[in-house]
Amino acid sequence: MLHKNNKSDGGKDELDAHQPAGEAVTLPRQEYDALKAKADERDGYYDQFVRAHAEFENVRKRMEKEKADFFRYAYEGLLIEFLPIIDNLEMAEKHIAEARDFKAVQEGVDMIQLQIQKFLKDIGLERIKAVGEKFDPHMHEAIETEESKDKEDGLIVAELKPGYRFNGRLLRPAMVRIAKRTEIKNDK
């Protein structure tokens, strides 16, 4: 409900706080045009927001699909490089059954082993040095100890299972046997 406050504010219309919805309000043309411009501006921003949100959702879905495809086919290049190794293993298997010269078989297996090691190195897999090295709990896992009078305490004397780093990150520690120095007793 509108009421006029003729004496206090020069006759401007004010909205009563208890005015029911849907009742007509009279505004000067200039105020109406300003409100209309603000409403149009708001509608434009809302449309931009809706479009940007839809575009964001499309990009998110496209990225999820690309990520899934990447993981699905990530090993394709590696497998293509590994196929010659598999071919050589299969050829070696065929020749082993017919082989009379086991030295030639051993040389063939050694060549395949070198091919595998080169492949693994090329993709970033590095074998951790163990035998002759000082025990490092960040790179080695001590499985056994061996008493020794002539070897330094904590020196790795045997590698039970090789350890590997992949692109500098520990993949698996080397399982090793380390020397435990025993004191030599001097009897007088």
Image (cartoon, rainbow, N blue to C red):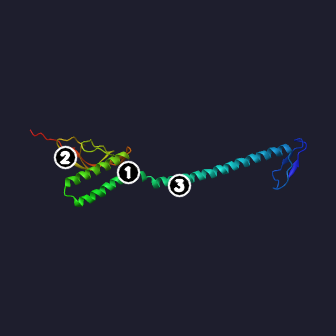
The answer to whether residue 86 is left or right of residue 178 is right
| Residue at position x 33%, y 56% in the image | 87
Quadrant of the rendering where the C terminus is positioned: top left
| Residue at position x 25%, y 52% in the image | 108
Type of amino acid at the residue the image marks with label 3:
Lys
Instruction: Please tell me which residue lies in front, 4 or 108.
Output: 108
Q: Are marks 3 and 1 in contact (CB under 8 Å)?
A: no
Asked if residue 122 shows in the view, the reply is yes
Counting residues from the N terminus, which is met first, the one under dot 3 or under dot 1? Answer: 3
- Measured as percent of width and height from the top left, residue 56 is found at 60, 50
Identify the residue under disc 1.
Answer: 81
- Measured as percent of width and height from the top left, residue 114 is found at 29, 48
Q: Residues within 10 Å of mark 2 (few under 14, many from 20)?
A: few
Type of amino acid at the residue the image marks with label 1:
Glu
Identify the residue under disc 3.
Answer: 65
Distance between mark 2 and mark 1 Cα atoms: 45 Å
Instruction: Please tell me which residue lies in front, 22 or 31.
Output: 31
Counting residues from the N terminus, which is met first, the one under dot 2 or under dot 3? Answer: 3
Asked if residue 75 shows in the view, the reply is no
| Residue at position x 53%, y 54% in the image | 65
Instruction: Please tell me which residue lies in front, 59 or 153.
Output: 59
Q: Secondary structure at mark 2?
A: strand
Distance between mark 2 and mark 3 Cα atoms: 58 Å
- Measured as percent of width and height from the top left, residue 43 is found at 73, 49
Closer to the observer: label 2 or label 1?
Answer: 1
Type of amino acid at the residue the image marks with label 2:
Glu
Residue 147's disc number: 2
